[in-house]
Image (tube, rainbow, N blue to C red):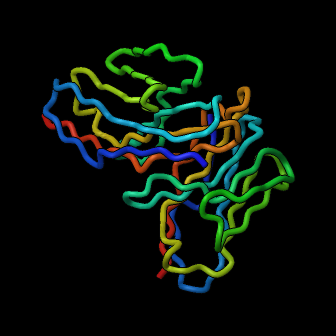
Amino acid sequence: AQKVTQAQTEISVVEKEDVTLDCVYETRDTTYYLFWYKQPPSGELVFLIRRNSFDEQNEISGRYSWNFQKSTSSFNFTITASQVVDSAVYFCALSANDYKLSFGAGTTVTVRA
Amino acid sequence: NAGVTQTPKFRVLKTGQSMTLLCAQDMNHEYMYWYRQDPGMGLRLIHYSVGEGTTAKGEVPDGYNVSRLKKQNFLLGLESAAPSQTSVYFCASSYPSGTSPGELFFGEGSRLTVL
């Protein structure tokens, strides 16, 4: 069985601060995929990244970066120089050799101006 | 670009009533999913389908049924609604990538209230 834990329920920061969202996963499979999705206040779910278990390179996309560490089963997400538009619920998800995505409970990020 | 369309967007039911949520995708995706989202619990998988005519149970299937008679449509049915089924329901579709479902494309959600 797979499990995703996002221990941080809510994070509040002031604009321009960096914020890191933790994601810890559990799976017995050696091949698996990790995802991050964003859900802004409007409610839609927006895909951010997909990473497979064989690629441990960190990824940067603009102000977003992801740190994948198999040794600690973590796939953390950092927003650099946060902006009000980054306010959203962020979900980490896992798929392991099957057709399904298992989601964490989500972390609500509030960026104050 | 329609993508994934869910109908209806909002519905209020009385306990014991039945209803069907329709999900339609125009991307020729093989996989389709129904999730429910409840506060503090993230998205939980109800049922999914890996192809036309196939369905499988997810994490929380009780009280729901599904059908995938056409590749582009995935129906979620509640035969006898209960207040515990008050939730926001999301449909998603994807094209397989290796052994992974690939990126999931989500509908806008359907808010269901059971009184």
Q: Nearer the viewer, residue A35 or A47?
A: A35
Above or below for B110 versus B16? above
Q: Nearer the viewer, residue B63 or B4?
A: B63
Q: Nearer the viewer, residue A10 or B114?
A: A10
- Could you tell me which quadrant the N terminus of chain B lies in? top right
Horizontal placement of A13 versus B32: left or right? left
**Residue shown at the point (59%, 24%) measured from the top left:** A52
- Residue B42 on image: x %, y %: 45, 52
- Residue A67 on image: x %, y %: 40, 22
Above or below for A57 versus A90? above
- Residue A6 on image: x %, y %: 38, 44
Quadrant position of residue A88: top left
Q: How many marks?
A: 0
- Residue B2 on image: x %, y %: 63, 39
Above or below for A34 versus B82? above
Horizontal placement of A13 versus B47: left or right? left
**Residue shown at the point (59%, 19%) measured from the top left:** A54
**Residue shown at the point (62%, 45%) measured from the top left:** B92
**Residue shown at the point (61%, 53%) measured from the top left:** B6
Above or below for A58 versus A51? above
Horizontal placement of B48 versus A64: left or right? right
